[in-house]
Image: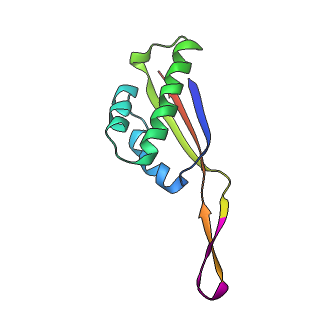
Amino acid sequence: MQTATMKFARISPQKARLVADQIRGLPVERALALLEFSDKKAADIMKKVLNSAIANAENNAALDIDGLKVQAVMVDAGPVLKRMRARAKGRGSRILKRTSHVAITVAE
């Protein structure tokens, strides 16, 4: 069982969880194929983290890649970048730029 994480990914957790729910529990080959052809921004981030988890499993734990499954995918909220946007009559409105912490665990 090996884990890979990406912290402070610039995507909202709500959007990233849509992709995370699709790959949870799949064999890694199918998960990679699904992420390859998905047109969501989160798919590129998940693919990067999944490849890292597979490499960790191969190099650190000497696991067989062919038998690996995506055991867990966790997307937690990171810090929020707060920005201001000018509005009418001298006011300003707040823009929240959300970040995510993505963790993927693979196991045989």
**What is the basis of the colouring in this image?**
rainbow
Residue 86, given in percent of the width and then of the height, sits at 61, 76
Instruction: Report the label total.
Output: 0
Give residue 69's quadrant in the image.
Answer: top left
Look at 53% across and 26% down and name the residue there. 53
In the image, taking residue 66 as reference, residue 11 lies left or right, namely right
The foreground one among 83 and 69 is: 83
Query: Residues in magenta?
Result: 83-90
| Residue 70, horizontal then vertical, whole percent | 46, 31
Q: Inspect the magenta stretch and tell me whether residue 12 lies in it.
A: no
> Foreground residue, 31 or 26?
31
Residue 105 placed where, x, y %? 54, 31
The N terminus is located in which quarter? top right
Q: 103 or 81: which is nearer to us?
A: 81
Q: Observer-nearest residue: 39 or 66?
A: 39
> Looking at the image, is 1 positioned above or below residue 71?
above
Looking at the image, the residue that sits furthest to the top is 62
Name the residue rendered at 44%, 22% in the picture.
68
Against 80, is 9 above or below?
above
Image spot of residue 34 (x, y percent): 33, 37
Report the residue at 39% width, 48% height from top: 40
